[in-house]
Image (cartoon, rainbow, N blue to C red):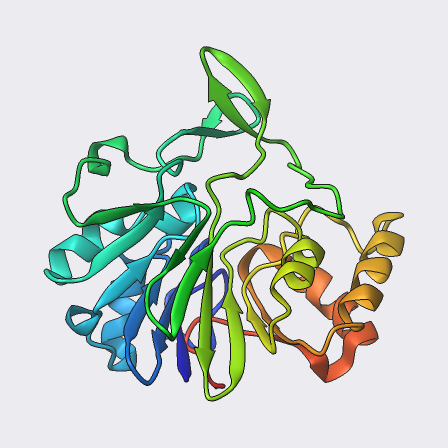
C-alpha cells in the first residue's frame, strides 16, 4: 500500500501548498482512494505536482462533517466523474467551533447522487470496510474541545457520531485511516487493533508546555502498549508531535504534504 499526502497543515517543499486540513491518496492492491479533500482545491493542485491522477480514483471517503476534511468535495466532483463518495449520513449536520463559527460542510452538496451514506459499519469488499464505533462502549472520554453541534436551535457538545474510519486489510496487516480521531485515539486503537494507524490525534489544544503535558504523556504511554505503528498529521499539532516523539520514538512519525509512505 502506498499513501501520498495531498494536503496537510505543513508541506515538505515550496512546490506543495499547505492549508489547515487533510487529504490522502491511497493506493491498495485493488483500489485508488481519496480520503478527505481538505478545505479547498489545494489537494488538486498538489496532486498535479505529485503526479497523482485524481480522475482515476475509484472511491472516496470523507471522514467527518467538518470543512477542513470535506470542503474540497465540490472540486473533486469536477475532476472525477466515477468515484462513489462514502460519507456518514450525519455529516451534513450543523457543526460549530463554539457558537459563532460554522465548520460544517456545504449542505448544497448533500443531494449529490454519488454520495453513499453510511451508518455504523459497512463492508465494502474483502479489503476495505468503514466503521464509526458509534455503537461501541468507549473506555475513554470523548473530549469536544469546544466543538459543538446545533440541533433545534440549541448547541450541544459534539459527540462526533458523524466521524468514520477506513479499515484496510492487505497482506495480512490492518491499517486504519482516520481524519481527526475525535472519538479519542485510545478508543479507536483499542477497538480496531491496527498494525498501522494513519491520521490526526486531535491533540492541538493540549499544550505540551503546560499541565497538559501529563495527559499527553499518559496517552503516549498507553499508545505504546499496542503493536501499532503511528503516522500522524494535521490536528495533532507539530509541538505536540515533538513531545510525543520524545516518549514514543520511531513508533510515531509525522507526515506533511508531499510525503509518501509505503505500508
For the point 27% across and 77% down, the residue is 49
Q: Residue furthest top?
A: 153
Q: As drawn, is 130 to the left or to the right of 186?
A: left
- Return the residue nearer the eye: 141 or 207: 141
Q: Is residue 43 above or below residue 135?
A: below
Q: Indicate the position of residue 190 as horizontal and vertical percent values.
A: 69, 61
For the point 46% across and 77% down, the residue is 169
For the point 46% across and 11% down, the residue is 153
Q: Indicate the position of residue 180 as horizontal and vertical percent values.
A: 54, 53
Dividing the image into 4 quarters, which one contains the N terminus? bottom left
Q: As drawn, is 6 to the left or to the right of 173?
A: left
How many numbered marks appear?
0
Residue 40 in sight from this viewpoint: no
- Return the residue nearer the eye: 10 or 113: 113
Q: As drawn, is 52 to the left or to the right of 102?
A: left
For the point 40% across and 51% down, the residue is 69
Q: Indicate the position of residue 97 as horizontal and vertical percent values.
A: 54, 31
Q: Indicate the position of residue 225 as horizontal and vertical percent values.
A: 80, 72
Q: Is residue 147 above or below residue 59?
A: above
- Return the residue nearer the eye: 26 or 68: 26
Amino acid at each position: 500500500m502506498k499513501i501520498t499526502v495531498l494536503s496537510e497543515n505543513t508541506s515538505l517543499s515550496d512546490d506543495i501548498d499547505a492549508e489547515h486540513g487533510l487529504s490522502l491518496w491511497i493506493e491498495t492492491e485493488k483500489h485508488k482512494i481519496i480520503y478527505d479533500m481538505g478545505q479547498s482545491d489545494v489537494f488538486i493542485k498538489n496532486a498535479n505536482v505529485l503526479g497523482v491522477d485524481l480522475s482515476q480514483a475509484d472511491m472516496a471517503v470523507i471522514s467527518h462533517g467538518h470543512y477542513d476534511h470535506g470542503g474540497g468535495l465540490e472540486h473533486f466532483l469536477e475532476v472525477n466523474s466515477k468515484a462513489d463518495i462514502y460519507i456518514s449520513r450525519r455529516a451534513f449536520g450543523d457543526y460549530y467551533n463554539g457558537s459563532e463559527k460554522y465548520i460544517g460542510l456545504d449542505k448544497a452538496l448533500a443531494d449529490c447522487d454519488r454520495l453513499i451514506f453510511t451508518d455504523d459499519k459497512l463492508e465494502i469488499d474483502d479489503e476495505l470496510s468503514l466503521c464509526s464505533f458509534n455503537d461501541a462502549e468507549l473506555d475513554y472520554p470523548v473530549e469536544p474541545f469546544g466543538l459543538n453541534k446545533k440541533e433545534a436551535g440549541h448547541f450541544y457538545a459534539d459527540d462526533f457520531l458523524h466521524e468514520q474510519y477506513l479499515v484496510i486489510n492487505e497482506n495480512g496487516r490492518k491499517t486504519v485511516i482516520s481524519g481527526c480521531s475525535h472519538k479519542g485515539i485510545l478508543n479507536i486503537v483499542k477497538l480496531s487493533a491496527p498494525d498501522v494507524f494513519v491520521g490526526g490525534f486531535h491533540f492541538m489544544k493540549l499544550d505540551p508546555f503546560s499541565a497538559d503535558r501529563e495527559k499527553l504523556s499518559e496517552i503516549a504511554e498507553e499508545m505504546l502498549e499496542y503493536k501499532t505503528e503511528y503516522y500522524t498529521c494535521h490536528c495533532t499539532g507539530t509541538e505536540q508531535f515533538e513531545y510525543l516523539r520524545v516518549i514514543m520514538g520511531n513508533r510515531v512519525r509525522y507526515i506533511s504534504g508531499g510525503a509518501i509512505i509505503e505500508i
